[in-house]
């Protein structure tokens, strides 16, 4: 599915009314029940009605085997705008770039036939089984879809269990030696150096895709041919275009040092003869 931002009909109508009156733009509400020039954009009653509909859509109470399916911890992500969430048994972290992180305790999960529902402070969350693809250009398929209702806005995205996420990360990092020739072919194409690798994965017809993070924050996708050495294409990536497991970890090719600062932990990667070929780094904050 394409991940998008679905605003309520009430909010859309309010914005249309403001625009018609010449009052759109700088004036806006500050959240649920926030007063704009024409009154609240969305009321607490409308938010409650949305939450009730989210629960009702999940169907009847679950059988014990279905409940077991939703007992895990989940990681979720979406785009337009980018967001991510960690959904633990009794705690949720909801993150959007440039905005304050929401960290809050969660109510016990109400598991239904089609998924589960939980309330976590200002967040209302449903997770349901069903293939979901996150990323502008198709990426890895996630086994769950997710909707997070926050301040009247529905954030739709994809989810997977924490165990699934760990497996996805290990797949590319554990096969680093396999991707090294393609990485070495792609790194010289970085303009703002040093470049680092956010993920590498096999493509069509024996090709390899290497995603690169530039020093200025720009991102590239470099495609290497089946010979492992010929660069076929290099294209810039939008902020929305991500694939599962990207940036976790980040690989820095030796002799470039790994990212510094207290928010990264790094470990050396040994090649043949115990020589260090680079470092794998993970963000911790």
Image (tube, rainbow, N blue to C red):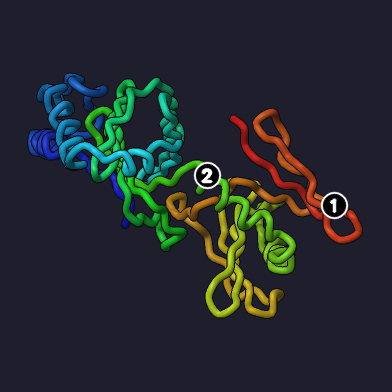
Quadrant of the rendered image containing residue 264: top right
Name the foreground residue: 5 vs 12: 5
Q: Is residue 88 visible?
A: yes
Q: Residue at x 16, y 33 (%)?
A: 50
Q: Earlier in the sequence, mark 1 or mark 2?
A: 2
Q: Residue at x 32, y 56 (%)?
A: 2
Q: Is residue 41 visible?
A: no
- Count all numbered tags in the image, as a single digit: 2
Q: Percent x, y for residue 157?
A: 35, 46
Residue picked out by circle 2 = 163
Name the foreground residue: 105 vs 73: 73
Camera-nearest label, 1 or 2: 2
Name the foreground residue: 60 vs 158: 60
How much space separates mark 1 and mark 2, taking CA atoms? Answer: 29 Å
Dot 1: what SS? strand
Residue picked out by circle 1 = 276
Q: Percent x, y for residue 132?
A: 35, 55
Quadrant of the rendered image containing residue 156: top left
Dot 2: what SS? helix
- Crowd around label 2: few <14 · some 14–19 · many ≥20 (10 Å): few
> Considering the image in quadrants, where does the C terminus appear?
top right
Q: Residue at x 41, y 62 (%)?
A: 138
């Amino acid at each position: 599915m394409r991940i998008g931002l679905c605003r309520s009909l009430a909010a859309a109508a309010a914005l249309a009314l403001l625009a018609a009156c010449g009052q759109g733009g700088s004036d806006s509400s500050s959240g649920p029940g926030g007063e704009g020039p024409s009154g609240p954009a969305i009321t607490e009653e409308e938010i409650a009605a949305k939450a009730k509909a989210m629960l009702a859509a999940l169907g009847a109470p679950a059988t014990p085997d279905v409940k077991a399916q939703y007992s895990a911890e989940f990681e979720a992500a979406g785009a337009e705008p980018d967001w991510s969430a960690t959904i633990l048994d009794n705690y949720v972290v909801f993150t959007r770039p440039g905005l304050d992180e929401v960290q809050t305790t969660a109510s016990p999960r109400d598991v239904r036939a089609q998924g589960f529902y939980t309330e976590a402070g200002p967040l209302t969350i449903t997770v349901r089984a069903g293939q979901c693809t996150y990323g502008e250009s198709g990426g890895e398929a996630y086994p769950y879809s997710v909707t997070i209702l926050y301040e009247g806005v529905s954030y739709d995205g994809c989810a997977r269990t924490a165990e699934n996420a760990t497996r996805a990360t290990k797949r590319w990092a554990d096969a680093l030696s396999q991707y090294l020739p393609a990485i070495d072919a792609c790194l010289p194409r970085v303009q703002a150096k040093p470049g680092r690798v956010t993920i590498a994965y096999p493509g069509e017809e024996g090709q390899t895709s290497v995603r690169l993070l530039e020093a200025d924050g720009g991102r590239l996708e470099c495609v290497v041919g089946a010979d492992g050495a010929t660069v076929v294409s290099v294209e810039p990536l939008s902020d929305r275009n991500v694939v599962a497991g990207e940036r976790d970890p980040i690989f820095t090719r030796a002799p470039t040092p790994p990212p510094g600062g207290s928010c990264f932990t790094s470990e050396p990667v040994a090649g043949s003869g115990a020589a260090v070929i680079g470092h794998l780094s993970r963000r911790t904050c």
